[in-house]
Image (cartoon, rainbow, N blue to C red):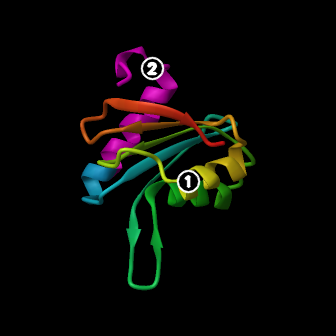
Amino acid sequence: MTDSSALDPEDRKIVTLARSVRARSGVPEGAAVRDETGRTYVAGTVDLPSLRLSALRTAVAMAVASGATSLEAAAVVSGAEAVPEEDRAAVRDLGGADTPVLLAGPDGVVRVTVTAG
């Protein structure tokens, strides 16, 4: 478990944004990513009959669609114990293998930080 108060303020911000979208939308996961200019993109899980995307893949797609060329960090708020490989791959595609991905529980406490690679 990582002490969330010890996080960099910008990382704490994306965890808070991810937690907020999860609660506001009532979805299983919330995610936020920060691009190379410091802009943030926030998304929840998409679960339609014809389209299913995790919150993190949706946030990465929103960043790409908005013109981001790289990512500095990503955060996911979820009940899951790990960040799925396909989610890490989406972050890696845009941000590179060393991009940190923070996984927090529904309470907003960061449980683990992994790299996209």
Which secondary structure is most common in the magenta stretch?
helix
Question: Crowding near pointer 1: few (<14 within 10 Å), some, many (20+)?
Answer: few
Q: Is residue 37 magenta?
A: no
Percent across and percent down for residue 54 are 45, 61
Question: Crowding near pointer 2: few (<14 within 10 Å), some, many (20+)?
Answer: few
Q: Is residue 7 magenta?
A: yes
Percent across and percent down for residue 97 are 70, 40
Give the residue number, with chain letter if any, for mark 2.
Answer: 7
Amino acid carrying label 1: it is Glu
- Of callouts 2 and 1, the N-terminal one: 2
Residue at 72% over, 42% down: 96
Q: What segment is highlighted magenta in the picture?
A: 1-21
- Rendered position, 87 above or below 5: below
Mark number displayed over residue 85: 1
Residue at 67% over, 57% down: 64
Residue sticking out furthest to the bottom: 50
Residue at 35% over, 18% down: 3
Distance, label 2 to label 1, CA atoms, is: 24 Å
Amino acid carrying label 2: it is Leu
Classify residue 21 as left or right of residue 88.
left
Say which of 61 and 82 sits in front.
Answer: 82
- Disc 2 vs disc 1: Cβ atoms closer than 8 Å? no
| Mark 2 element type | loop
Residue at 48% over, 45% down: 32
Q: Quadrant of the N terminus?
A: top left
- Rendered position, 25 above or below 9: below
- Does residue 68 show up? no
- Does residue 92 show up? yes
